[in-house]
Image (spheres, grey):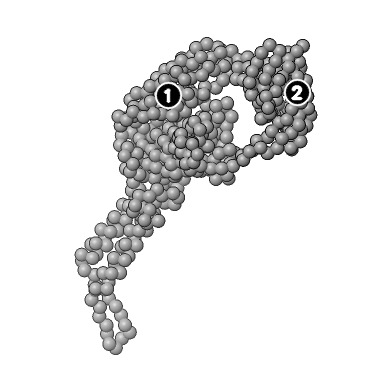
Amino acid sequence: MFADIINKVTFAGGNAGLCVFYMAATFVVCLVTVIACFCKQTKDQDAPAKKSIAAPAGAVALVAVASLVVFFLVRSPGGIPGGTGGSGTGGEAENLTMAVGDNAFASMSIEELGAIPRETWVAKEANGEVVYFFEGQYTEGFGNIVDPACLDMYLCKDGSMYGSLSGPDTSVGSGVSYVYGYWYNVDENGEDNFVIHLTGNQNLDGSTVPTNVDAGADADVFIFETDHGAYNWEASLSYGLYGGMMTRNINIYGQKYAPATSLTIDNSALPVFYTGDALDAKMLDCHAVRATGNDEFIWNGRLNYSGYDSSTPGTKTVTGSFLGASATFDVVVEELVTETYTGEYQLIVDNTPTAMAASMLVDYSHKTITVMAADGSAFMSGSLVEASEGKLVAILNNSSPLDLVIADGKITIPAHQETIMGWFGPEGSYDIAEAVLTLAS
């Protein structure tokens, strides 16, 4: 533990300041013990042994100075922003104190935080309410997956935290989800303690997921001083994935908020979107010039977006922003084309094909087919390979390509074999009987 403090290793857990106190106190005790060995001693031959130590004045002064050093070490845990003894980073952030008991966001659930419009969160940066910015990443170390998943967190004057977890291909973030929570630098005991609390995530479809600490994810992230160039603080946290099936470790680094100087966005590879679609910006090419002067490629999921509206078709002008810099680009939205059929279909329940009332959604725009049980208990997904007058070619649940015939307001799915895929390959193949469903009005 002492070696971690001396060598500036990230201290994960406990109280780093108290550890330094123990180290200094141990040094003082050892010093006094050694000094005592050289002090003059007297003994009365006719009386029980007695010892008297006459410490040199210099030794007493040395002990006094050491005691003062210990006192100030405990009183001044460096790097905790805005705390009563912390050094901070200068400016307004240096004097900002946020006690956990005074933080109105500490009692809010992820559902309540997610209900606040995204525009309200993003506006905090434009309004100068962001005081600290933390960023980190996790990169897969196997296979051909090399793209980073990034965790960005904006800490605001009011004690709130918002940001995003995103990544193009990694198991941490194959897409974008928003992160919400709060922060404080004075804990419930009134002591300096810089903590970021991750309340949970919100997916692009609006659904929310609270942080699952039972599955190994960290809700409270303890921040410690560091020395990594422009960064003043660092931490390491475990992030829960797939409903707690696994966790991933992410290192984050923070500094007093400093805006980027410019941002460029290339939308030439962006696909067409359809009415009702969420904005998926993974095909954007984004570069930001940071306050350090570096021109960096920025994974586009890290940007905040405003101006996107898919309720109606047309060309939408969207603004992307990152650390205060912004740029605009166009997004084309077309009318979504779908058909819905209802009837009876054999869905696989407990490894058994089971006939049940279901609806089939044929999405011509996204080229997908989904069959959902009427009670929501089971579903099947597939892809639309080809669509022509009176016939569809589809792959249903990893089947071979099937000819689906449309006539007289009905769709006929021939008997076929569907395969359920697991982590390590096919888990089972099942014979599905022919089904005829009727076009819904």
Question: In the rendered image, which residue does mark 1 sit on?
Answer: 285
The Cα atoms of the two marked residues, 2 and 1, are separated by 44 Å
For the point 26% across and 60% down, which residue is it? 64
Task: Where is residue 393? Give x, y as percent.
Answer: 67, 20
Q: Residues within 10 Å of mark 2 (few under 14, many from 20)?
A: some
- Kindly tell me whether residue 29 is visible in this rendering: yes
175 lies above or below 268: below
* Residue 312 - label: none
Task: Where is residue 374? Give x, y as percent.
Answer: 74, 26
Horizontal side, residue 23 vs residue 161: left or right: left
For the point 76% across and 36% down, which residue is it? 352
Which mark lies nearer to you, 2 or 1? 2
Label 2's element? loop
What amino acid type should be assigned to the residue bearing mark 2?
Pro
Label 1's element? strand
For the point 31% across and 52% down, which residue is it? 72
Task: Point out the image quarter for the N terminus.
Answer: bottom left
> Relative to the observer, which residue lies in front, 199 or 381?
381
Would you say the residues marked 2 and 1 are in contact, meaning their CB atoms lie under 8 Å apart?
A: no
Q: Residues within 10 Å of mark 1 (few under 14, many from 20)?
A: some
Task: Point out the image quarter for the C terminus.
Answer: top right
What amino acid type should be assigned to the residue bearing mark 1?
Asp
> Relative to the observer, which residue lies in front, 407 or 238?
407
Task: Where is residue 387? Give x, y as percent.
Answer: 65, 15
> Relative to the observer, which residue lies in front, 211 or 343?
343
* Residue at the farthest bottom position: 46
Q: Quadrant of residue 408?
A: top right
For the point 43% across and 22% down, which residue is it? 320
1 lies above or below 423: below
Task: Where is residue 3? Give x, y as percent.
Answer: 36, 56
Which mark sits nearer the N-terminus, 2 or 1? 1
Question: In the rendered image, which residue does mark 2 sit on?
Answer: 414
